Amino acid sequence: MLRGKKEFTLIDDQMVAFEAIRDASRKCQQDGKKRTLIVEGGPGTGKTVIAFNLLAALTREDQYVIYASKNAAPRNVYLEKLTAGGFRKTSVSNLLKGSGSFVDSKENAIGTILCDEAHRLNEKSGMFHNKGVNQVLEIIHAARCSVFFLDESQRVTVLDIGSREEIEKWAKKEGSEVQILSLTSQFRCNGSDGYLSFLDDVLEIRRTANPTMAGIDYDFRVVDDPNTLRDLILEKNKEGGRNRSRIIAGYCWEWPTKGKNDPTYHDIVIPKNNRGEAIDFEMSWNLGSSATYAIDPDSVNQAGCIHTTQGLEFDYVGIIIGDDLRFENGHVITDVTKRAKSDQSVKGLKTMAKTDPVRARKLSDEIIRNTYRTIMSRGMKGCFVYCTDPALAAHLKERL
């Protein structure tokens, strides 16, 4: 796309959004006014595809454009692909920035900022979250035209503040005109909106018209043994030599520093399958917290997590659901105490629980359900699931 090739054909509401944003961006450069566009859409609706089409199109018009995101994993993959494709790393790295890069930016220093995964934005920036005022404010301040691609159901950490309300608040403060756009047709998960509705229903995020998988054309399976899950993903990963299938686990196993670069150190150990039989299943989290887990040649033999896969997609995903999601007394319940201590997603909840237990419980519940919804929607063609809780496995099978 950066070379002018029409790599993706935008259709329906994708093209409507692309043209609306391009027109708004051009107007900003002509009349000097600030404009903010919020593009709302679920998994697979084309948010990132639209963002990259805009990055390419507006850059070719000699405008200074930046693609920004909180999660580094997608940016690292894009950078790797671009440099492998012949672009100079220094050139393309200036197009791809973290969401905390605008703390010290001057007002309107950038033509357009395309903020992908805007639901993952934080208030403060920096390693210790002590820099700046608010990432939403800083992005709007730094650009004449700011675009936020948003799915509030993918907020997966305590620090995630990205919401339509938050963006509108800071846009008003900066004197920026706001426009809302919506993406409804999704093209991941075999193009099945029914599957995403099923996930929302079965995870008890919201009631939908798809309580079962009946009539839904998507390869969703529940297996009773994690070894079966691994075999399925290894098999799918070989199909067509694509290397595009991965295992992703809930963050219920510790990720100690001592084993991060040791392939013989297995963080994830599951001693029994759902039939109560002793098994031999061990697996490492992605080694060295690889910045490009999604495309590393050998990472199919390691487990990714929400942080190394959000914003990316695969042909097939194998999901290991840990004890933080179980089925009890007729309902799917969450249990934040089963999350690994090394999980930064829920850091701060214990302190919050002392002063505001209701909010802490609501937030932890939302984070866990959203995490599994997000990783279970990464597969283009299929999703295979193993649950450490036999009752949850049985419930999912009943809902098929």
Image: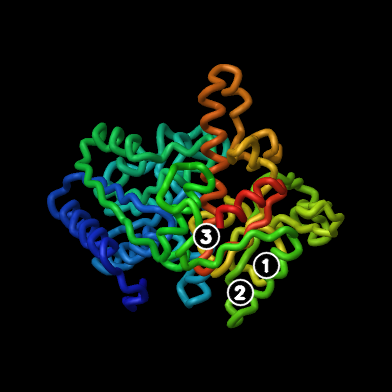
First in sequence, mark 1 or 2: give its number.
Answer: 2
The three-letter code of the residue at mark 2 reads Asn
Q: Position of residue 400 (x, y in %)?
A: 56, 58
Q: Position of residue 190 (x, y in %)?
A: 45, 68
Direction from residue 254 to residue 128 in the image, left or right: left
Residue mark closest to the camera, 3 vs 2? 3
Rendered image quadrant of residue 284: bottom right
Q: Residue at x 55, y 67 (%)?
A: 219
Furthest toward the top, the residue is 355
**Rendered position, 82 above or below 208:** below
Mark 3, other Cα within 10 Å: few <14 / some 14–19 / many ≥20: many
Query: Observer-nearest residue: 8 or 189?
Result: 189
The three-letter code of the residue at mark 1 reads Val
Q: Write down the residue under mark 3.
A: 378
Q: Is residue 95 visible?
A: no
Q: Residue at x 44, y 47 (%)?
A: 99
